[in-house]
């Protein structure tokens, strides 16, 4: 499996968890879509250092080769999956009264 | 100092987000049990992804810019810290936006 395929799969799993499994449905909330652009901004900033300085390097055969601020586009999908899963779990535990 | 490049980026992320706790009083660290139950499973899942990607050769690292602590499977400590720091920053961000916009997130 390429990183491209893994990243798309990661997003699909996170979206399925949000909508159908955890049923937190942050994808339908203004608060999520207002938070996510802020996170993407800082992700592009930090990721551009990690990839621009060649701290992390990618196999050209595993990615499409489309880059934003030095980082492969796949990293945005990876980040989206991680952030959505994180915020879903945070809200899910909150619903269960865990504080 | 070169070997601190990766962890410096993580420190920058923390600095960019951690002020939200005292200034906006988001209470994320006060709810440390909930934070741990959120961050640890996410870190576990993404460490596994990282190990699989390293094994598949999807990415590799310049260890001269990292702490040099490497776990079995070629997993650098820096990456593990990434999967702990970024989720904490994301939760801080969500709670800050919720506080400012006064919009529900679904756990009210």
Image: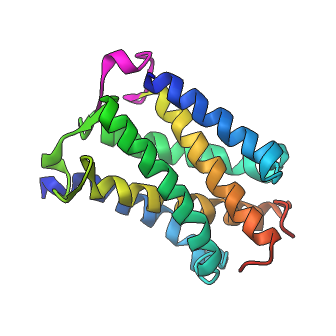
Instruction: Tell me which corner region of the image, top left, top right, bottom left or bottom right, holds residue B51.
Output: top left
Q: Is residue B25 magenta?
A: no
Can I make out residue B42 in this image? yes
Q: Is residue B60 left or right of residue B88?
A: left
In the rendered structure, which segment of residues is drawn in magenta?
Answer: A57-71
> Where does residue B19 sit, x and y in percent of width and height?
52, 72
> Where does residue A47 sit, x and y in percent of width and height?
40, 41
Residue at point 49%, 28% (across, down): A74
Using the image as rendered, state which of residue A77 and residue A70 is in the foreground: A77
Q: Is residue A49 left or right of residue A40?
A: left
> Where does residue B57 sit, x and y in percent of width and height?
30, 29
Residue at point 73%, 78% (across, down): A98
Using the image as rendered, state which of residue A44 and residue A65 is in the foreground: A65
Instruction: Tell me which corner region of the image, top left, top right, bottom left or bottom right, holds residue B106.
Output: bottom right
Residue at point 59%, 76% (across, down): B21
Image quarter (top left, top right, bottom left or bottom right) of the C terminus of chain A? bottom right
Q: Is residue A59 magenta?
A: yes
The relative height of residue B48 versus residue B43 in the rendered view (above or below) is above
Q: Is residue B65 left or right of residue A42?
A: left
Using the image as rendered, state which of residue B30 and residue B37 is in the foreground: B37
């Amino acid at each position: 499996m390429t990183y491209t395929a893994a990243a798309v799969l990661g997003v699909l799993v996170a979206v399925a968890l949000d909508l159908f499994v955890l049923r937190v449905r942050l994808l339908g909330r203004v608060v999520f879509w207002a938070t996510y652009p802020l996170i993407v901004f800082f992700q592009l900033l930090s990721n551009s250092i990690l990839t621009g300085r060649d701290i992390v390097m990618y196999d050209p055969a595993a990615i499409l080769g489309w880059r934003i601020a030095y980082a492969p586009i796949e990293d945005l999908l990876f980040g989206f999956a991680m952030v959505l899963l994180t915020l879903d779990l945070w809200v899910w535990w909150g619903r269960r009264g865990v504080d | 100092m070169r070997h601190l490049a990766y962890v410096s980026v993580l420190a920058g992320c923390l600095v960019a987000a951690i002020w939200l706790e005292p200034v906006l009083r988001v209470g994320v660290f006060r709810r440390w049990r909930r934070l741990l139950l959120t961050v640890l499973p996410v870190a576990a899942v993404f460490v596994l992804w990282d190990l699989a990607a390293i094994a598949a050769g999807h990415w590799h690292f310049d260890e001269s810019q990292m702490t040099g602590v490497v776990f079995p499977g070629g997993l650098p400590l820096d990456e593990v810290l990434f999967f702990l720091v970024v989720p904490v920053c994301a939760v801080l961000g969500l709670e800050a936006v919720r506080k400012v916009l006064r919009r529900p997130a679904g756990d009210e």
